[in-house]
Amino acid sequence: MNIRSINCNFDELVLMLSSMDDSFDILILTETWLLVDFNFVLNGYYNINSLGHTNKSDGVTIFIKNNFYLKSITHGFITECNSIELVFDHNGKTLSIIGIYRSPNSNKDNFVIILNDYLQRLNDSNVYYIIVGDININIIDPDISFDYLNTMASHNFISCINECTRITNHSSSCLDHIFTKNINSDNIQAFILKCKITDHFGTIVLIENSVNNIKDCHTSQNKTRTKINIKLLNSLISLQNWNDIIDRNNIDKSFQHFLNKIEEMINMSSFNHVSKMSNKYKRIKDWITKGLIISTNHKHKLSKKLFKRPFDSNLKQKYNNYINILNTLIRNRKKIYYQDLLSKLQNNPKKMWETINNIAGRTKTYNVEINSIRLSNNSIANGNINIANEFNTFFANVGKNIEYNIKKTAMIMRTGQI
């Protein structure tokens, strides 16, 4: 999805995801406008950023669920754009997820040439390749997209999105693409998500059977609660003979006996109730409320009406006013939530600083499996034992190496003075 400044639109993205019945294993955001690394906290996910290097509008951010362990993370492998490649194993298959953002101001022909060189390396028939991104090449227009589509097809990449992903009053174009390779087309479902976070629609690809079972991936959460049958409890209380409690001389023992009886009858009237928790109001950020999710859904309904009636000035004014009110509610809700949270943590400095760092995006962890490391002589050490031995050797000789470098520097300085 094109997010056009993740800092500005992250809250709205979170509310939209919270209002959806299903959750996604991987989220790829383009045009993030990120110039410095930042950890955007999303419950159940960790994120990887590719920062803008050409202009402020660049950037790709990928959110991936915590249960995925990455084999590798690669940045910037296509010089004419922002790019991230994540490689991981899942359900016995190796997946390569590639997120790309190409600025419309970059040279399209150079991009296609460099892309072709990169795609030549994606030749492992045992790997499922998925390329996702805002490429800013309109594949509906054959005059513009011929070389690009021909390059993708020559490397056996199949386009999953072939309808308009950006519609304005004056134009319609398909700029946001999903391409797959080595995946049976019968197992792929692709959709366009008509949301209005920016002027681009979102795109979705679901892969069945061979990679994951969608039902397993998007199950609703069940919750077990203890409920009390009030009618049964009232009946037990009315039938209870209380004389043995009233007739006691020791009031403390009488009261304790009374409490024991009440507790016994409550237990007799209680039962476990399993309620299916719909994902419709799931909270992927702790400050989210059901009311904010409902308000966000209403905003999307107004957006759809405005899309059908773009020249209705009254509806446009109503939509803009609603957005302003909703944004104010979101800011106030976050402020109140974090004020209350930090107030509760006043006596726990460690937890307070953890929370502050999370809010500020200073903490970041990756679930990355380290299978090999590059040594100082550019050779590669593979396997856990070899990697551990190399680390042991390095740290065991840190002192000697520092001493040697100090003596070497001093000798060079003396020689230079002479």
Image (cartoon, grey):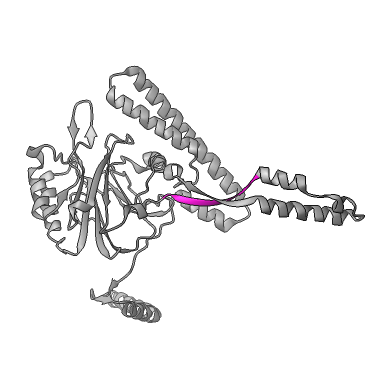
Instruction: Identify which residue is drawn at 28% across, 72% down.
Output: 372
Q: Position of residue 297 (x, y in %)?
A: 40, 34
What's the magenta bit mostly, secondary-structure-wise? strand
Q: Position of residue 167 (x, y in %)?
A: 23, 31
Instruction: Reply above or below: 402 against 170.
Output: below
Q: Which residue is nearer to you in this view: 302 or 98?
A: 302
Instruction: Reply above or below: 65 against 54.
Output: below
Instruction: Reply above or below: 105 against 397.
Output: above
Q: Which residue is nearer to you in this view: 409 or 389?
A: 389
Tell me the quarter of the image containing the C terminus.
bottom left
Residue 150 shown left or right of residue 79 in the figure = left
225 falls in the magenta region: yes
Residue 42 shown left or right of residue 62 in the figure = right
Q: Which residue is nearer to you in this view: 222 or 326?
A: 222
Q: Is residue 82 visible?
A: no
Q: Position of residue 344 (x, y in %)?
A: 61, 49
Instruction: Identify which residue is drawn at 48% across, 33% down.
Output: 329
Instruction: Identify which residue is drawn at 28% across, 24% down.
Output: 308
Which residue sits furthest right?
249
Where are the magenta residues, as a range? 220-229
Q: Is residue 319 visible?
A: yes
62 falls in the magenta region: no
Tell me the quarter of the image containing the N terminus.
top left
Residue 274 shown left or right of residue 15 in the figure = right
Instruction: Identify which residue is drawn at 24% across, 47% down.
Output: 189
Q: Which residue is nearer to you in this view: 224 or 52?
A: 224
Q: How many marks?
A: 0
Q: Position of residue 379 (x, y in %)?
A: 23, 76
